[in-house]
Amino acid sequence: MNQKRKSVNNKVILKKRKVLTFGEKKELCLFYNENLSLLQEEIGKKFEEALAIWISNALSVNKTITGEIIIAKAFDFARLMNIEGFTGSVSWLNNFKKRHNIKQYNKHGEVQSRPSEEELTKKREKLQELINNFDLENVFNCDKTGLYWKLEPSKTLFTGPLSGIKKSKNRVTFLLTFNATGSIKLPALFIHKYQTPRDLIGIDKSKLPVDYFWNKKAWMQTSIWNKYLELLNQRMKKRNKKIILLVDNALVHSVSNPELLTNITIHYSPPNTTAHLQPANAGIINSFKAQYCKRLIKNRIETYDDEIELNIPVPKLKIGDSISLCTEAWKAVTSETIHNCWIKTGILPSVVMSPSPSDEKLNNVINLNETEEVQRLLDQYNQYSNFTLSELMSTEEFILINDDNNYEEEEITDEEIVNIIKSNKTDLAEKEINLQPKISTSEALESLDKVLSFLSNPPDNFVIELNNRNLMHNFKKQIILFDKNSKVQLVLDGWLNI
């Protein structure tokens, strides 16, 4: 809708006790019709998104899916979302399948339906031909993974069997994006279950080291995927790059507005080949998880040390801590590891297809070093825990506890799916948020003054870092400026209300 019509409509709508002219009536009808069309389009997107989530979840728990089942389930969601006039025609089904890249309904678990080596060779050759049209700097892959962000290495702390369905609520979803040379690792996409966790109140989430999204299940969904693609497209524009992005053919990876992706060409992996042809699954995700596990255990060991030495209660890991740990973990995944994982898949052009013995050796050494370091930290962690040997996880169990084979294997109701795609404002922040008392600016300044007074006249042998003192001064300035601006706004509001 153009801006001119919008301004005219506002004047027309605000008219009171006057008879509208024919032109104004026509303008008003156009306004409502356009808004109704936009509303219907938005409802249609959410309807299809809910159905796509249901299909993905059904496949993940090994349900058989047919066209008839999709149409039947679509009617269920239409009733649940109060959508009238849905016919469930064959034409609609075909268009839905096309929009969501549904070519066949394979059950979850690619090990059971592994392609033959001959088939994989042919698919590799096709990918090599495709990739050969791009500079390797502009060849990207991305994939998502679940992460139990504060799970410590004890089987008793895990709410389900290690080989079964995972029920922990402390899970987030990550999407890692990187190029074939390993020279570019983009900020991770991070999906949490709250829009504003307590730990991030007052934080500008656009300035976090991750791309922060949310829904009630902390799952990837089509709308989040498309927002991320638009963000990725902007980043590639700034870099003056036109890239090819290799992704798996999951339903949530459907593209709503392909015309907006001016700098991205998306190529979907053939069905049942993700485990064999996706670089992310060739070791990059596991390397990231190993790096995260190291940092998580190290964080817990440091807090236990503080408890013993300083008598400080062990603080719970917060989501802000996890974001920092994840950022550090992703930075620690080396370009060598990333490039070698691309080589391992065999999808790069023949010039660089085969890894040299030195590359393989380097990759093995890196993986061995990561595992050994996790084991060393686990041994140190075990000294603080009261768990028996049978309760403690092995290094492999701890790293692979978030294994993709079990990701999202949790049956959910249709109502829960609808809630995932809705923006329910009562769920924007954690329920416990009201338990935290509000601190006024005057109270905060008073406390900061005490800290600064302490730093200006510290006890003997207490060494102060200049950066820490400057940080306190900067905090004080920020609060004073905020307080001043707030008072100015109150005065302006008072004048406007006169």
Image: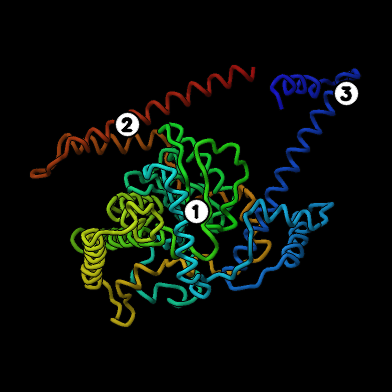
Q: Earlier in the sequence, mark 2 or mark 3?
A: 3
According to the picture, the residue beneath numbered tag 3 turns out to be 25
Residue 476 — which label? 2
Location of residue 463 with respect to 1 vertically, above or below: below
User: What colouring does the structure picture have?
Assistant: rainbow
Location of residue 498 with respect to 165 vertically, above or below: above
The image shows residue 95 at horizontal and vertical percentages of 72, 52
Q: Amino acid at mark 2?
A: Lys
Quadrant of the drawing holding the C terminus: top right
Query: How many numbered marks have been drawn onto this rendered protein structure?
Result: 3
Q: Nearer the viewer, mark 1 or mark 2?
A: 1
Q: Earlier in the sequence, mark 1 or mark 2?
A: 1
Q: Give the CA separation, mark 2 to mark 3.
A: 56 Å
Q: Amino acid at mark 1?
A: Val
Q: Which residue reaches farthest left?
A: 461
Q: For mark 3, give the secondary structure.
A: helix
Foreground residue, 427 or 58?
58
Q: Give the CA separation, mark 1 to mark 2.
A: 47 Å
Q: Give the CA separation, mark 3 to mark 1.
A: 50 Å
Location of residue 247 with respect to 23 vertically, above or below: below
Residue at x-position 39% and y-position 44%: 186
Q: For mark 1, give the secondary structure.
A: strand
Q: Earlier in the sequence, mark 3 or mark 1?
A: 3
Q: Are marks 1 and 2 in contact (CB under 8 Å)?
A: no
Can residue 465 be seen in this snapshot? Answer: yes
Residue at x-position 21% and y-position 36%: 467
Q: For mark 2, give the secondary structure.
A: helix
Q: Are marks 2 and 3 in contact (CB under 8 Å)?
A: no
The image shows residue 161 at horizontal and vertical percentages of 45, 78
Q: Quadrant of residue 397?
A: bottom left
According to the picture, the residue beneath numbered tag 1 turns out to be 247
